[in-house]
Image (tube, helix red, strand yellow):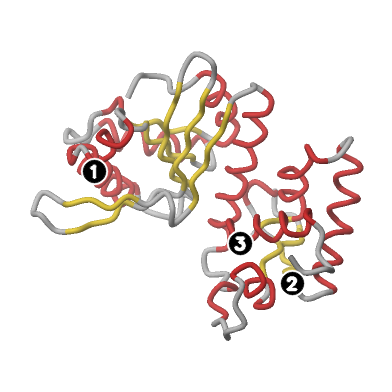
């Protein structure tokens, strides 16, 4: 570790490497358990991010975004080239594709999902394992024997004293036609039929689509109900404010 970086600095850098983008508020919530109270977490996280920014380990974006932030102006953080090199232990030149903001809102929505999972697990005393991209991707052979990849946004395992729940999570921004969502669901069904996941874990995870509002939820549920090739019990559609209850109670039906 560099002499000028503290363990909390490394943790913040690692979170940004994991998620690519995160707001100040999200980083506060992910590290709040390290501090005595929320006010202290906000003050200390702000100080640490400012120091990382001063040393050019991180880049700050100031912009207005919609969705879960309500259109407010927020500070969004990402690793600088120096930060990436520091974490990867390399001095080689790194191309700046890491800073691409093409899918910024989707990245931030995935980060927010991770934050809510983290908070719910602590609240309900669950053990939580979250795999991020690309670690959560699944490689398998299609029906035609060709190699293919299933790319969830997150793979999640929730463990309590009584049960283990597994989920593939898709964070939907309501930007695609429901027909494309159905095609992705069919890809999940093809993966289930391959038996690859069941061989590894003994069970196939529930597939959870997190959608931004009730209207989108209704549209996707109607689309799922009209697709005869999909086992309906495998798929759950929820809004963000229903995610915490999912972690507490498990999937509404056994997958």
Residue hosting label 1: 191
Judged from the image, the secondary structure of the residue bearing numbered disc 1 is: helix
The label on residue 17 is: 3
x, y percentage for residue 35? Answer: 85, 40
Q: For mark 2, does the 10 Å Cα neighbourhood hold few (<14), some (14 to 19), or many (20 or more) residues?
A: many
Distance Cα–Cα, label 2 vs label 3: 11 Å
Residue at the outermost left position: 144
Can you say whether 19 is above or below 228 in the image?
Answer: below
The mark that comes first in sequence, 1 or 2, is 2
Which numbered disc, 1 or 2, marks the residue closer to the eye?
2
**At 64% from the left edge and 29% from the top edge, which residue is drawn?**
120
The mark that comes first in sequence, 2 or 3, is 3
Residue hosting label 2: 57
The label on residue 212 is: none
Q: For mark 1, does the 10 Å Cα neighbourhood hold few (<14), some (14 to 19), or many (20 or more) residues?
A: many
Which numbered disc, 3 or 1, marks the residue closer to the eye?
3
x, y percentage for residue 185? Answer: 29, 43
């Amino acid at each position: 570790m560099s002499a000028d970086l503290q363990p909390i600095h490394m943790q913040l850098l690692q979170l940004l490497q994991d998620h690519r983008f995160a707001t100040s508020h999200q980083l506060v919530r992910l590290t709040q358990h390290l501090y005595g109270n929320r006010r202290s977490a906000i003050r200390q996280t702000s100080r640490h991010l400012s120091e990382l920014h001063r040393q050019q380990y991180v880049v700050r974006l100031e912009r207005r975004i919609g969705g879960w932030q309500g259109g407010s102006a927020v500070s969004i953080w990402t690793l600088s080239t120096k930060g990436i090199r520091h974490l990867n232990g390399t001095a080689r030149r790194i191309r700046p594709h890491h800073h691409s903001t093409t899918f910024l809102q989707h990245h931030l929505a995935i980060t927010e999902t991770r934050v809510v999972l983290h908070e719910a697990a602590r609240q309900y005393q669950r053990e939580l394992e979250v795999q991020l991209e690309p670690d959560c991707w699944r490689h398998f052979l299609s029906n035609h024997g060709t190699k293919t990849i299933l790319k969830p946004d997150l793979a999640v395992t929730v463990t309590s004293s009584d049960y283990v729940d597994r989920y593939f999570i898709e964070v939907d921004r309501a930007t695609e036609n429901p027909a494309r969502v159905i095609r992705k669901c069919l890809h999940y069904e093809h993966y289930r039929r391959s038996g690859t996941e069941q061989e590894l874990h003994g069970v196939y995870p529930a597939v959870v689509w997190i959608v931004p509002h009730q209207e989108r939820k209704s549209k996707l549920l109607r689309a799922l109900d009209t697709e005869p090739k999909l086992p309906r019990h495998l798929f759950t559609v929820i809004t963000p404010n229903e995610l915490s209850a999912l972690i507490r109670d498990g999937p509404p039906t056994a997958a």
